[in-house]
Amino acid sequence: MKNAIARQTTFLFLSSMLLIACGKTDVPNPNFPNKPATNTSNIIPIGIAFAQTSNVALLGQEGTDGVKLAEKYFNHKGGINGRPIKLVFQDTGGDEAGAINAFKSLINQDKVVGIVGPTLSQQAFGANPIAERNRVPVIGASNTAKGIPEIGDYVARVSSSVAVVAPYSVKAALQQNPQIKKVAVFYAQNDAFNKSETEIFQKTVKDLGLNLVTVQKFQTTDTDFQAQASDAINLKPDLVIISGLAVDGGNLVKQLRELGYKGLIIGGNGFNTSHIFSVCRALCEGVIVAQAYSPVYPSEINKAFRKAYVEQYQREPPQVSAQAFAAMQVYVEALQSLDKKSKVSNLTLAQLRTELNQELLKGTYQTPLGEIAFTPTGDVIQKEFYVAQLKMESNGVKGKFSFLNIK
């Protein structure tokens, strides 16, 4: 009888200990509630909403490359005063619905402190209001359309407005050929950014006293541009300006050249990717693109970023990767600053999101893009801009952005 009682007592004791242990494991982190209990209480999660699928995936991949390098770089330097940052990815796909779903998941399930993204301006107009309603800071790394920072108090961007950047490329084209008189414009009518960009290009053309001979529309999903290209070529333009993404824009360049157009071509911000080379290949030669980033910008942070990028990917870093890195840098430095004032570990998630948003707008940051800051509405203030011309190797496969001196 005594042995039976002893065995029963031991069993009850062990059962109690197991229940206590399980109870301790399941205690939620008060700062990041509902997170998996896998020793994540020390990390600071930052959401990444980039396109990993669809026809926008090439651009989304360049953003992903940039934030991953930033995560490694800043964690190696100690993270947020000893606490590591952790990227949490959600695929936005190529449309607004995908971006909205990605934002909802990052905010409600992943409990991130802030978001970098989405990939397209069109997506930002759909998804950023979700973050605004939930009071979650968003930094756009590739959103340049007019009106994005004005979406709300929690919306900012490190990607300069197309209204600032686009005119530089037209100026560069006129320096190369002062005889330009007639201009043909093409744009993707189903994309908010490209519609915004073409308005700037068309205004610049008119302000310079040039003759806008035609405006041709297409879709970012189009592959056949023969009709639009032929119509434009028949008007004998001296300059063609294209607002599109890498795949559609690159194919349009290719078909214009194949149909005999020999004049200068300007590509919009959608051409700011090395993936353009694989689309129009040798026919990419000579396309002019204005940029908000130069790999040779002489700063320590850019040297470190460029070195890490080249070692990882064996090519020069593109604009979107640099902007994505800069967006992460803003979060890191704002969190570091906030943590020194009041430990972020003592804040609830809602408090941290609000105070982080206020802190990041105050700072001045020495990034790979150069020195940047923010207006009260969250738009980036950037001093340096560039213009590059696509130069292809003799095999027509590899190319580079060759930077021009613009007076």
Image: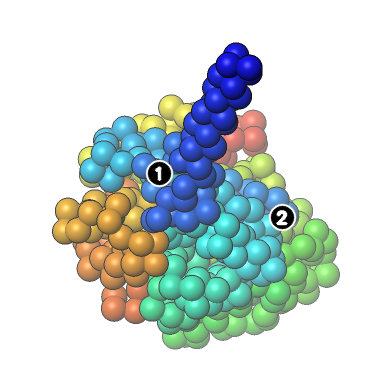
| Residue at left offset 47%, top offset 80% | 151
On screen, 27 above or below 358? above
Residue at the disc numbered 2: 55
User: Which residue is drawn at the image coordinates 59% and 65% (left, top)?
Assistant: 104
Query: How many labels, in total?
Result: 2
The front one of 198 and 256 is: 198
Q: Position of residue 7 (x, y in %)?
A: 60, 19
Locate the N terminus by quadrant.
Answer: top right
Q: CA distance from mark 2 to mark 1?
A: 37 Å
* Residue 279 horizontal/vertical position (percent): 69, 47
Whether residue 13 is visible here, answered yes or no, is: yes
Q: Is residue 70 above or below residue 240?
A: above
Which residue does the numbered mark 1 point to in the structure image? 41
Furthest toward the front, the residue is 1
Residue at 65%, 64% (x, y): give it: 101
Task: Pick whichever, 200 or 74, lies toward us.
Answer: 74
Position of residue 247 relative to residue 268, above or below, is above
The amino acid marked with disc number 1 is: Ser
